Image (cartoon, helix red, strand yellow):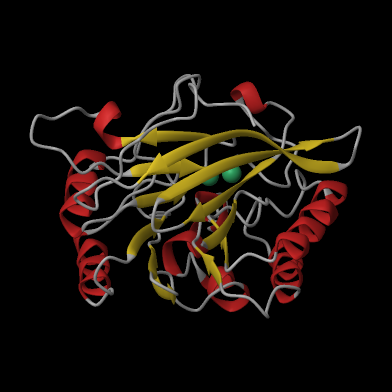
Amino acid sequence: MLTLLHGSDLHFGKPFDPEVAETFKATIREIDPDLLVLSGDFTQRAKVEEYQAARAFLDEFSHMPVVVTPGNHDVPLYRIWERILSPHRNYRKYISTDLDTVTVVGDATVVSLDTSAPHSAIVNGRLKDRQLLFAAEAFDKAPAGGVKVVVVHHHFVSAHDYESDQVLPGFRRCLETFGKMGVDLILGGHLHRAYVADSRDAYPSESDESGIILAHSGTTTSKRGRARERNKNSFNLIGISRAQMVVTHYQYQPDRRQFEAVRAHRLPWGNQSALQHESAGNGGDV
Ligand SMILES: [Fe+2]
Ligand SMILES: [Fe+2]
């Protein structure tokens, strides 16, 4: 069993909630996952002091593999010249020198791709052809039968209860390309609310038998939860075995000062190594 702990949108800076963050850190230590994934928006305004705080957070988990990716808040919004000339300067200095990465943990190959696109689409993101090629080359080297995971910040499928949001332009082509690569799972954040989607349900196609599961984390440590996670904090715990994948949403409970499992999605692997989405009783409370 491979265990991925997936949080997002920490937002060091004004919206950051230190009490929730302390609990989140304790929870990571307690679960001790095989891989920690943080899918973007480490900061609120890409400021040095926000990045220093984010770096200090990451340093506490230097003993475990960590996959990161930049979000739209990790490039400067108002410092125009910096955004044009060196948008990822602080991210590269404090979080990761590389914007697109490959991490192999057990049988899983995890490719993170920067969707922040500071020059063209600061809010809803972009993926470039060269990034899809980067992912294809990484997955070509993946072990046969291994799990293929993509980590991005932005979303390819809208959350059901989220109003007036815009998915990443070119989402259909990206999903089709990832499908051809045999990608099983896409992890993201950005919307500040947790949800699980299946590409076959979101964009039905007669020829598409091997769907991709998309799992989003809410904001794990900021006060800006949205939609049904307004004022809430969450992360996902993902367990992957040969038989199935289980995505469990954990939500912070302020009265008990702990994260607790609130919903789980059980996703059995199909006969042709495709995932078959089988939610445990319409989202199945645990
Ligand atoms: Fe965010
Ligand atoms: Fe975002």
x and y, in percent, of residue 240 in the image: 46, 56
Residue 158 coordinates in the image, percent (x, y): 40, 29
Name the quadrant containing residue 279: top left
Specify whether 95 is left or right of 213: right
Q: Position of residue 98 (x, y in %)?
A: 44, 76
On screen, 285 above or below 95? above
Measuring 61% from the left and 48% from the top, which residue is drawn there? Answer: 9
Q: Is residue 124 visible?
A: no
Q: Is residue 50 left or right of residue 266?
A: right
Quadrant where the C terminus sits is top right
Q: Is residue 27 above or below residue 20?
A: below
Q: Residue at x 83, y 43 (%)?
A: 258
Residue name at image x 84 percent, y 56 percent: 22
Q: Report how many numbered discs are placed on residues in the image.
A: 0
Query: Looking at the image, which is closer to me, 264 or 205?
Result: 264
- Residue visible at 27% across and 45% down in the picture: 270
Q: Considering depth in this image, is 86 or 1 the residue closer to the camera?
A: 1
